[in-house]
């Protein structure tokens, strides 16, 4: 345990994680945003979300003269509310650095999927470098399944277990890893700033919700087909309250950190897809996000604010906006957030 602590509870090994791994991306994002804090002013807005939060700060910030705000992103593909809590705890220790935190949601209502999100142990791999000794019991207790709890508890105590595959890859080619880490540190901020989304679109996509069939665009690839089937055309699952409980726990903890802060928490509903699932497919029993919005300092942007983007020509697959969609959403989102912070009406 002493060797594990020396290697993995100091900056020594985490500084040389594979930059493209889930842990590496999380850490590179945190590093980039900490550095950016010293380069921008006080009217700073940070966004949290997964890959579906399809906007580019570069495009949103073309409107800074109009909105008055600088946008940054601390989200990461595949991350969720549990990871965002630990991201913000270390990115903003005083809970006062940002004018607002904007959180992108698929839905304000709570819909359960095929599994309990609380038991998704991938979260451990995103936040492992952020976990302190004092976090172990609380973090472990947030998982429900006994096997998940054991995996998380063991990995939180002995971080080397989580880093094992990364460490083996490092030892196989240490010079290559070190060089790539140094390259990524120099270039990550610029790479992510300059990234251009794919111009591909889903133009021609049609879904017959009665027959439960889809007509795909000519030349649609496997990712386009599968994301439509998995994200849009899945059969509803039993609704048992998993999602509501998860959101109340982790967004509740985030809101508790900012309870006495001038930072506003803003939720927005992301564009739902190139086609929209019928609302009556599943009876959603609760809306934890609307419940949270009753607290001081929390606002919901009108859930229909981005409905105009829900068209096949603005999506590259069943999940993600394409280049044109991202450009439009970036501008619309920046204006909606600015309006909210100026005191415009947010929909509850």
Image (spheres, helix red, strand yellow):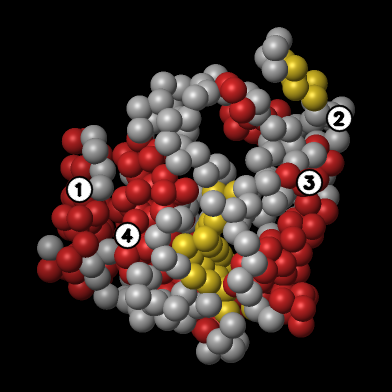
Q: In terms of sequence position, does the residue under pointer 1 or pointer 4 come before the other?
A: 1
Image position, residue 209 (x, y; %) = 70, 17
* Element type where label 4 sits in the image: helix
Q: In terms of sequence position, does the residue under pointer 2 or pointer 1 come before the other?
A: 1
Q: How crowded is mark 4: few (under 14 residues within 10 Å), some or many (20 or more)?
A: some
Q: Is residue 176 left or right of residue 189?
A: left
Q: Is residue 42 above or below residue 14?
A: below
> How far apart are the two marked residues, 1 and 4, measured between alpha carbons?
14 Å
Q: In this view, does 252 lie to the left or right of 214?
A: left
Q: How crowded is mark 1: few (under 14 residues within 10 Å), some or many (20 or more)?
A: some
Residue 35, numbered circle: none
Q: In terms of sequence position, does the residue under pointer 3 or pointer 2 come before the other?
A: 2
The structure residue drawn at horizontal position 74% and vertical position 57%, both measured from the top left corner, is: 329
Q: In terms of sequence position, does the residue under pointer 1 or pointer 3 come before the other?
A: 1
**Which of label 3 and label 2 is nearer to you?**
3
Q: In this view, does 242 lie above or below 329?
A: above
Q: Can residue 19 be seen in this view?
A: no
Point out the image quarter for the N terminus.
Answer: bottom left
Q: Quick one: 302 or 11, which is closer to the camera?
A: 302
- Contact, CB < 8 Å: mark 1 with mark 3? no
Image position, residue 200 (x, y; %) = 82, 44
Q: Quadrant of residue 5?
A: bottom left
Residue 308, numbered circle: 3
Q: Name the residue under label 2.
A: 204
Q: Name the residue under label 1.
A: 141
**Which of label 1 and label 3 is nearer to you?**
3
What count of labels does the image hold? Answer: 4
Q: Name the residue under label 4.
A: 253
**Which of label 1 and label 4 is nearer to you?**
4
**Which of label 2 and label 4 is nearer to you?**
4
* Element type where label 2 sits in the image: loop
* Element type where label 1 sits in the image: helix
């Amino acid at each position: 345990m002493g060797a594990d602590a020396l290697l993995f509870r100091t900056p020594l090994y985490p500084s040389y994680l594979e930059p493209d791994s889930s842990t590496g991306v999380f850490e590179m994002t945190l590093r980039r945003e900490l550095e950016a804090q010293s380069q921008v002013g006080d009217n700073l807005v940070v966004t949290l979300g997964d890959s579906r939060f399809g906007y580019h700060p570069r495009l949103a910030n073309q409107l800074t003269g109009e909105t008055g705000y600088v946008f940054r992103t601390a989200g990461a593909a595949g991350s969720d509310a549990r990871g965002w809590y630990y991201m913000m705890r270390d990115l903003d220790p005083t809970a006062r650095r940002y004018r607002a935190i904007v959180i992108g949601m698929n839905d304000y209502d709570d819909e359960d999927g095929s599994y309990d999100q609380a038991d998704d142990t991938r979260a451990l791999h995103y936040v492992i470098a952020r976990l302190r000794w004092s976090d172990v019991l609380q973090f472990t207790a947030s998982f429900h399944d006994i096997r998940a709890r054991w995996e998380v508890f063991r990995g939180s105590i002995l971080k080397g277990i989580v880093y094992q595959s990364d460490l083996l890859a490092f030892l196989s080619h240490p010079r290559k890893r070190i060089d790539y880490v140094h390259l990524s540190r120099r270039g990550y901020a610029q790479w992510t700033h300059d990234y251009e989304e794919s111009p591909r679109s889903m133009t021609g996509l049609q879904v017959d919700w009665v027959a439960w069939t889809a007509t795909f665009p000519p030349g649609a690839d496997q990712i386009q087909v599968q994301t439509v089937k998995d994200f849009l055309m899945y059969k509803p699952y039993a609704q048992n309250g998993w999602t509501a409980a998860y959101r109340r726990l982790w967004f509740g903890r985030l809101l508790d950190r900012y309870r006495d802060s001038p930072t506003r928490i803003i939720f927005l509903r992301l564009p739902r897809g190139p086609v929209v699932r019928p609302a009556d497919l599943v009876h959603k029993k609760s809306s934890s996000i609307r419940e949270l919005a009753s607290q001081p300092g929390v606002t919901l942007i009108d859930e229909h604010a981005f409905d105009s983007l829900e068209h096949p020509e603005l999506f590259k697959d069943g999940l993600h906006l394409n280049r044109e969609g991202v450009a439009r959403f970036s501008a619309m989102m920046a204006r909606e957030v600015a309006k909210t912070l100026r005191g415009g009406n947010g929909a509850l």
